[in-house]
């Protein structure tokens, strides 16, 4: 039972003892016929193993899996100790590799790296990214559980799209055509109305977007929350600010070595500035001569606005608020004093939108009217509308893209780098 | 901003103060024209509100949402205190209800309860079930994080089914046909090989099973784990035992009032007995005259075996081990000393299988051979097989159905009762 083995990072604590180590042979340095140095890697890190005598003749391809029994001794190696191998068991021999893992960076193109994803994930940079990503998701949950939110699982096979039919993947569901959920939007609102009041979900969402850019993947993880008995989008922005403070604090605390390895710095946030969309557009025109599309920002504008926030308020984050009703979904709540605008916001982080949120319509008749105004058929939304028939509180919520947040936090160029097995326009494997 | 309101369960701490309460009016008891008692419910519980004078004339349908300003006073009510309303704001008025929520049980059929799911979820029994379910998922994660497991998200849109094509939902993925993942099986194994060694996932799985029974739903939540560097299925059973101990302890600690409300008792586990399938079948024949299908147990047999375990060892849980190779998937590892049997197990809990687990084949050539033996085409599994080409450790894992575990823990007859919005042969909404 190898589960009782000692991990690489624990070796130092076993100095002078005979232990068993198990892992991948990342590098073999042969020093004559009677001596070799192996770099062995496991989930905790790596260790140097001295292989001498007949054992040094073991012809072992890189990335083969071994169990090694030996004595821990102090040495002049980088770590100050090493393992002197007495016995080696080969658990699995590797084929010739498409690229090596012992270099500071993988020497291969991005497609090659994704084609051989299991191999590329073994690189210490990738190990670090996904350890951090896990901490982000866990900190999101911990913050919300402490704030009285209930964790839920909502269906991913749904009868109707959230936004009226575009960008949906069809599923053959027995005799019916169903769709993959673009977001848990409807269901999280329904669960607020179902009396849970405060709910969150960490789960997959699916978007049949045709874009194939560094900013898009077709399946990603959404950090969703929704809460009742609020009537101000500012409450949501306050909540997201505290949530990001918790997440960044957890990453700083638990992942310092990973951050160092990746050369990444997690921001300190006090208050995140809030700009109405109209203000943001004015700033982009006056400061950068960059016009924006009607009622929105474009990707270049998002980047410039983050530069502006960095320069003006020394923060990499900025909320953009008050989007027009025309660019928001039918369920977005309009402002009473300015019905052409909604109680809504996006959050930009280092040039990329990572959140959309806002208040929602909570009255049945207003929702029906909002659907009709957009030419949508209320009958197709009957299961959703019913949630507002029997008393739903005023409510709102937001969603954070886990891959987008992780990628911006770590300065990764492409969302695929923050996705174990990305799905895009062309890629369905591995 | 109602977010600063006082919750029902906090009222007692505000005795003598003027506070604001917000929630659903579950029951109105009119006592003449000048006096009414309302039961108001929020996510924390309920409180009695005394409505007098002109306010008592408010004609308010049950389940309407209100905000009430008033003074907390001691009273002869069940709780010992109540709120004397000074002002009532109606936030949303409810339509006529298909069933009431203030009774000990909802008086409606199971289809009706699911058709009006948002309403039925408001019943205190259902609130309790989903609070417990959330604690189960959180305790699963906490135990595994502490044991060095990494939380992962694997793709739900996949190119190939795990078991060779049956029971898959097809997805139109741009120009290709893809499928919904039946389990994260392939990906969790690939991630062990990707150097993470120990991974877990809490996520949706999809099974196009035609069965429409209390034991089947077509989308459910799988608690999956996989770990490397083990060579004994016993290690997995030990791990699952500890995991269930942690989960049951967390539920006992955090959900005592919910358990009491549901009349449920969470078992104390020391050791879970382990029976080889052949032994289990012999017991079923000799003790109950119940023959089993070849190489397996049937649902009636699973129930009888749990009765036997309860009677013999005073435990509601029993592992059944050593399933034949013919009834397990191609990746199951056969026993060297008895190649017709696998290193595998199921866990039965109060009459229902809640887990399947076992050791897996970790050598590329053996996997290819296992596919060929079953008439499967290795080319269709190329992305999976590659994970075993470059050195994969011996490994194994298991999966627990979250709804099955929750339902058996709470003595619920039907998995749908432990599912917010169940998907089955007929049901795609709400």
Image (spheres, coloured by chain):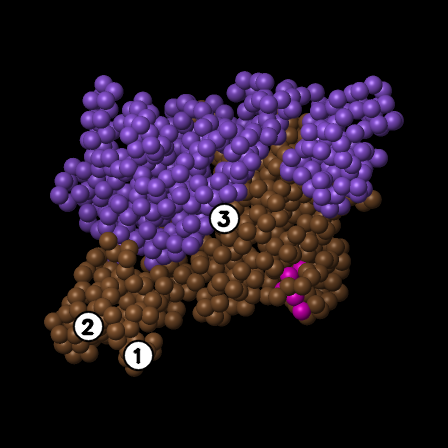
Chain colours: A purple, B brown
B317 in magenta: yes
Give the crowd class for mark 3: few <14, some 14-19, many >=20 residues within 10 Å: many
**Location of mark 1 (residue):** B77
Name the residue furthest front: A76
**Camera sees residue A96:** yes
The local secondary structure at tag 3 comes to strand
Label whose residue precedes the other's in the sequence (2 or 3): 2
Main secondary structure found in the magenta portion: loop
**Chain ID at mark 2:** B
Dot label at residue B167: none
Label whose residue precedes the other's in the sequence (2 or 1): 2
Q: In this view, does A148 lie to the left or right of B142?
A: left
Residue nearest the viewer, comparing A95 with A11: A11
Magenta region: B314-318
Mark in the foreground, 3 or 1: 1
Give the crowd class for mark 1: few <14, some 14-19, many >=20 residues within 10 Å: few
Residue A303 pos. (x, y %): 33, 25
């Amino acid at each position: 039972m190898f589960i009782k083995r000692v991990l690489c990072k624990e070796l130092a604590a076993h100095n002078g003892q005979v232990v068993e180590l198990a892992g991948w042979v990342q590098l073999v340095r042969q020093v004559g016929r009677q001596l070799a140095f192996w770099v062995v890697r496991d989930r905790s890190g790596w260790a140097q193993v001295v292989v001498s005598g007949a054992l040094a003749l073991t012809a072992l391809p890189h990335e083969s899996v071994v169990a090694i029994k030996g004595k821990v001794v102090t040495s002049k190696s980088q770590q100050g100790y090493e393992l002197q191998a007495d016995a080696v068991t080969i658990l699995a021999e590797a084929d010739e590799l498409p690229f090596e893992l012992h270099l500071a960076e993988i020497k291969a193109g991005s497609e090659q790296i994704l084609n051989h994803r299991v191999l590329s994930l073994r690189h210490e940079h990738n190990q670090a990214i996904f350890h951090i990503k896990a901490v982000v998701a866990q900190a999101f949950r911990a913050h919300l559980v402490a704030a009285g939110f209930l964790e839920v699982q909502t269906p991913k096979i749904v009868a109707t799209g959230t936004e009226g039919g575009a960008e949906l993947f069809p599923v053959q569901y027995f005799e019916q055509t169903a769709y993959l959920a673009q977001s848990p939007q409807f269901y999280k609102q329904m669960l607020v109305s179902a009396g849970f009041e405060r709910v969150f979900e960490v789960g997959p969402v699916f978007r049949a977007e045709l874009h194939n850019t560094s900013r898009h993947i077709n399946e990603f993880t959404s950090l969703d929350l929704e809460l009742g008995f609020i009537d101000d989008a500012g409450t949501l922005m306050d909540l997201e600010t505290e949530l990001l403070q918790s997440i960044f604090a957890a990453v700083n605390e638990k992942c310092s070595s990973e951050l160092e390895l990746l050369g990444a710095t997690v921001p300190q946030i006090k208050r995140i500035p809030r700009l109405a969309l109209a203000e943001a557009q004015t700033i982009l025109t006056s400061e950068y001569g960059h016009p924006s599309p009607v009622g929105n920002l474009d990707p270049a504008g998002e980047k410039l606005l983050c530069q502006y926030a960095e320069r003006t308020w020394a923060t990499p984050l900025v909320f953009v608020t008050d989007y027009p009703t025309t660019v928001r979904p039918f369920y977005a709540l309009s402002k009473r004093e300015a019905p052409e605008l909604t109680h809504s916001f996006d959050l930009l982080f280092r040039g990329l939108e990572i959140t959309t949120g806002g208040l929602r319509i909570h009255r049945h008749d207003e929702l029906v009217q909002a659907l009709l105004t957009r030419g949508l058929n209320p009958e197709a939304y009957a299961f959703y509308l019913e949630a507002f028939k029997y008393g739903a509180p005023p409510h709102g919520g937001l969603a954070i893209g886990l891959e987008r947040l992780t990628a911006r936090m770590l300065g990764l160029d492409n969302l695929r780098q923050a996705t174990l097995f990305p799905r895009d326009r062309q890629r369905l494997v591995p």
